[in-house]
Amino acid sequence: MKFSSCIILLFFAFSGVGFAHDANKAFFNIQQKDNLVEVRAEFPWSIRNALLEAYPELEHSKSKADFDTAFFDYVKTNFELRNDDSILKLIAVEEVTHNEHAHANAFIFLFEGNAFDTVKNAVMFNVYKDQENYHDILVSKEHLKFITSPDSPVAVLQPISERNGGNRVITGLIVVAFCVFGVFHWSQRKKL
């Protein structure tokens, strides 16, 4: 009886340790830094499955360099930042230590450029048909959030100038009103 009680206690004690985040969800924080765009990506353990699906020859490779090269190519193919019709150049993919979850993988993608208006993110779509990629973009102290999925892998961002266009219109109307008022006031004084 004691032995079975110990097993049950051990099961409950460690039951939460073995479960990972959803295998079909990844998270991306995107931020402009000087002349680079930095993407902090957090993947579940299943990113390895996506990489092996895309590059089956890695199954028998023991070289970390092979995996690094394949992952760079995988990111370059499946994650794009575009500015109008040009694609920002991916210049680095770096693994970073991730203290929150032992079953997650964290990376930084660095793109050359200082502006983008479209995000294409099809990472892990080759493994999960219900994959969801969550994005948080920091632009001028404003967070833009959206999700890409196999049904909708591309997100077109509204340019900041258009988002703030309402302020410019109001400012323009105020300036025009002051000009009209000034001309009216000047013409009234001239009649006296």
Image (tube, rainbow, N blue to C red):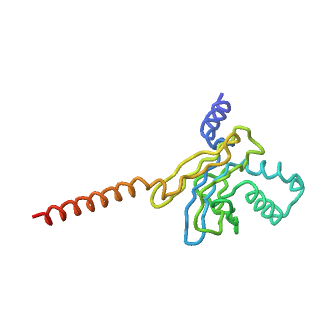
Residue 41 placed where, x, y %?
Answer: 63, 56
Q: Residue furthest left?
A: 192
Q: Name the image quarter holding the N terminus.
A: top right
In the foreground, 54 or 1: 54
Q: Which residue lies furthest to the front in this view?
A: 191
- Taking the spot 83% from the left edge, 48% from the top edge, the residue there is 53
Q: Name the image quarter holding the C terminus.
A: bottom left
* Number of numbered labels in the structure image: 0
Q: Residue furthest bottom?
A: 34
In the foreground, 182 or 135: 182
Residue 124 placed where, x, y %?
Answer: 73, 47
Please tell me whether residue 47 is drawn above or below residue 22 in the rendered image.
below
Please tell me whether residue 23 is drawn above or below residue 167 in the rendered image.
above
The quarter of the displayed image where residue 24 is located: top right
In the image: residue 129, left or right of residue 40 = right
- Taking the spot 86% from the left edge, 56% from the top edge, the residue there is 58
In the foreground, 89 or 25: 89
Q: Which residue lies furthest to the top in this view?
A: 1
In the image: residue 43, left or right of residue 135 = right
Residue 18 appears in the rendering: no
The quarter of the displayed image where residue 107 is located: bottom right
- Taking the spot 21% from the left edge, 59% from the top edge, the residue there is 184
Residue 73 appears in the rendering: yes
Residue 32 placed where, x, y %?
Answer: 55, 65
The quarter of the displayed image where residue 30 is located: bottom right
In the foreground, 93 or 13: 93
In the image: residue 102, left or right of residue 66 = left
Residue 100 placed where, x, y %?
Answer: 58, 54
Please tell me whether residue 65 is drawn above or below residue 151 in the rendered image.
below
- Taking the spot 73% from the left edge, 54% from the top edge, the residue there is 78
